[in-house]
Image (tube, rainbow, N blue to C red):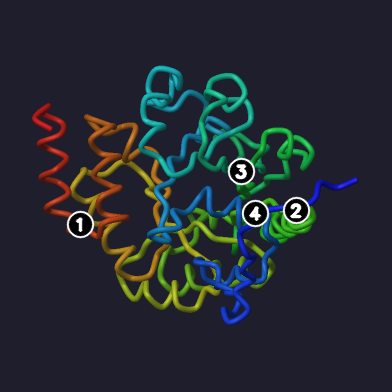
Amino acid sequence: MPEKDDTKKEKNFYVNVQQKNEAFFLKGLNSMDWGMKNRMSGIFNPETGKTVMLAIDHGYFQGPTTGLERVDVTIVPLLQWTDTLMLTRGILRSVIPADYGKGIVLRASGGPSILKELSNENIAVDIEDAIRLNAAAMAVQVFIGGEFETQSVHNMTRLVDMGNRYGIATLAVTAVGKQIERDVRYIRLACRICAELGATYVKTYYVPEDFDTVTSSCPVPIVIAGGKKIPELDALKLAYNAIQQGAAGVDMGRNIFQAESPVAMLQAIRKVVHEGLEPEKAYDFYMTSKNGNR
């Protein structure tokens, strides 16, 4: 039998207070299931609506990338300043501490190495393994305009279907081949196609001209790729300009772990993304932090 509710305090049902139905803080995702929203809240900071992703999945096609030769030595010390981590299941299982409490973005496509045609990828992770690894999202390359365009789009849509079934997000990564010009028209096309076909959010390249038309025409959040290593100030400017034009975050790898001071660079990027700090001031912070004065 249930215990008698013998509390002497009068109950208050707040009959005059209407229950709130708050919209989810990320655009385009209000109709997602609770589990999906919860996982996306582990990737994006709910207070700012932005994310600083650290991408260390390069080895899945190019082996021990400079700066990633020993992930346990170079990357694990950076984890506390990340919002989320994008990596392969092999590195996750073998190196990343199990008490890492942020969202995991699991590289889910693969196949060819840098020695082959990179666009010829397939799904390389079973959804059951993504669940076992407690992944918040699965990342898949989508080669719009590439030789294996249709195959890569089908990879994405299959992941979307599997992910929706279990509340795991799908990150569509727009990949640009050497033969395709990386201009705003192409970026708009690629991002919109991925969103139309169900991607939870999209990772793409930043282009200086009219990037706000990319973010405004894509109905789900966009994070920008850091790309190849560039000078630190240029990387901070790239992040700042993208955020100011509607990006919901950055997914940087080489511009962090190949920086002279990866910790200082990651902290500076966080100030740009979450605090809106101008790149020149963020660079001053980086230099001061790098020199050990902060």
Secondary structure beneath dot 3 equals loop
Q: Nearer the viewer, mark 1 or mark 2?
A: 2
Q: Nearer the viewer, residue 148 or 234?
A: 234
Quarter of the image with the C terminus is top left
Distance CA(mark 1)–CA(mark 2): 54 Å
Q: Which residue is mark 3?
A: 117
Residue 278, quarter of the rendered image: bottom left
Q: Of tags 2 and 4, which is closer to the observer?
A: 2
What residue appears at the point 61 percent right and 48 percent down from the top-left corner? Answer: 139
Sequence-wise, the earlier of marks 2 and 4 is 2
Ranked by sequence position, the earlier of labels 1 and 4 is: 4
What's the distance in space between the residues labelled 3 and 1, CA to CA?
A: 40 Å
Separation (CA) of disc 3 from disc 2: 69 Å
Q: Residue tagged by mark 1? A: 277
Residue 213 image-quadrant placement: bottom left
- Label 2, label 4: how many angstroms apart (C-alpha)? 43 Å
17 shown above or below 97: below
Residue 158 drawn at (x, y percent): 77, 55
The mark nearer the N terminus, 4 or 3, is: 3
For discs 3 and 1, the disc positioned in front in the rendered view = 1
Residue at the spot 58% in from the left edge and 32% down from the top edge:
60
